[in-house]
Amino acid sequence: MGARLEAKHIVKRFGGLEALRGVTLTAHDEILGLIGPNGAGKTTLFNVVSGFLRPTSGEVIFEQRAIHTKPMHEITRLGIARTFQIVKPFSDLTVLDNVLAGLGCHVYPTPRAFAERYHAPQKIAQARELLAFTELLPWADTLAGNLPIGLQRKLEIARALGTNPRLLLLDEPAAGLTAGEAEELAALIRKLRAQDKTIIVIEHNMAFAMNLCERIVVLAQGEIIAQGTPAQVQNDERVINAYLGH
Amino acid sequence: MDYFISLAVFAGIWVVLALSLNILMGYAGQVSLGQAAFFGIGAYTSGILALKFDQPFVVGFFAAIVLTGLVGAFLGLPSLRVRHDFLVLATMGVNFVVVAIFKYVDFFGGALGLIDIPTPRFFGITNEIPYLILVWLYVGVAILVSWYLSKTWTGLALNTVRLNEEAAAAVGVSVPRFKIYAFIISAALAGGAGSLYAHYLKSLFPDNFYFVESIVILSMVVVGGVGTLRGPILGAIVLRALPELLRDLHDYRFAMYGGLIVLMMLFQPMGLLGDESTLMRGIRRILKREVTNGRAA
């Protein structure tokens, strides 16, 4: 079977700044870590893959289909979901409704969006299943904006899972979490991996990334400087230099 | 008696206008200062069909809804490019342009407006009660549309657009498409209200739909409670009825609307009947006490 995702020679320029300089990356059924110093282009790469930004040049292929010209909502419907570095829960909606918003992914483009009520028993049951899976069920009726940051990050994952993705992009999911919360999150991500989902994780927390990911790709100044198993990457001189600023 | 019927007819029309803006602003988060333009387009569509093409009220009414909805889709296009303050300015500009067209294009009657628009008569009844019933039936339709919309996937999608456009796209919501939907539904409802206004007032002038009317509609939504169903209804009734009941204050009504907006923004930004407003919290407390007392008894 081919790769789940192939990003080929991705260049992204913002005026005179070249944030991505010909990045080529492949993701199979795995937990892939994307690490690198600040400003390396990690989130820009996520934005290009998820359709939030169009690449200046290059191609993004998802399950043998070119997606780099498609808008974000279409890419979501094709099976790529993401979370955000700065969490963006629908703060005025309950936790349950946030997950329902994800479950509506394939209803929004159809006439059913005007005819069907979203609080249908079957959809609520599905949403509650996802909340149970992400251990958020006790907060189902809480407004998302009132949750602590750790639970908001979990909620973003639950909401993304509602869209039924085959590729999940997690942007710094462990940021701001306590050690205990990060461990819970890692367990959750492993459960997702067991469901045959491909997961790409941007992470600054090295211990978290090294323990969780099967393979690591290192970006620095818009280029991939190393990739391999966590052990290989940890001992790579270019990576050490990039992090130490040599 | 006729005076109170007239008051109730206008209150009903403004309730629909407030509900129509609430769909755009409260549901989809698109703050507009151009709602009077949609109101005017509906009124002029109906008035012109009656005066120049001899069409009955029913034709004018439905044509006003359809045509204003279509114009709403077109005038909603700026919302795809601009957000927040810039959208407010763009919709304000749209209002000025629409009024200028009414004023300077002869087909629309120019500054002299349209006069002698026929009032429909129902079953030979000559007083205004059937018209009052018709207006409030339309209010019922607007309430039903608003309520049902809020329960559907479209309502949920509009909410996600209001709360965060990037996150909305990340759950598969086509943000441009749903913004345009909100403009269409909102404009169509306001267009129907315009038709009812035209046939009741019997004459139309461009200034009836001036930008300041958009501010009045906005005040009704803000004072009542943006995003709720009850808020805009209360806001429209209070702000429409109050200056009429306190005749001496009529000349100062715009100052009153402006002052109310400032006060609401300072002390109750969620509106009088917003979910977390002082009034609603008080009502909920009283209801809870009643239930507890009932159980104890």
Image (cartoon, helix red, strand yellow):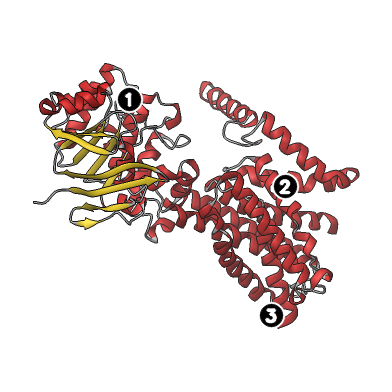
Badge 1: chain ID: A
Badge 3: chain ID: B
Give the SS element for disc 2: helix
**Front one among B264 and B7:** B264
Give the SS element for disc 1: loop
Q: Which residue reaches farthest top? A: A179
Q: Gap between marks 1 and 3, in whole Å?
A: 65 Å
Q: Earlier in the sequence, mark 2 or mark 3?
A: 3
Q: Quadrant of residue A188?
A: top left
**Front one among B87 and B229:** B87
Q: Amino acid at mark 1?
A: Ala
Badge 2: chain ID: B
According to the image, label 2 marks what residue? B237
Q: Amino acid at mark 3?
A: Gln
Mark 1 vs mark 3: give the one in front: 1
Is A229 left, or right, of B218 in this rendering?
left
Q: Amino acid at mark 2?
A: Ile
- Residue drawn at x 58%, y 31% is B276
**Any part of residue A121 in sight:** no
- Residue drawn at x 84%, y 59% is B2
According to the image, label 1 marks what residue? A175
Mark 1 vs mark 2: give the one in front: 1
According to the image, label 3 marks what residue? B55
Q: Which residue reaches farthest left? A: A1
- Residue drawn at x 48%, y 41% is B163
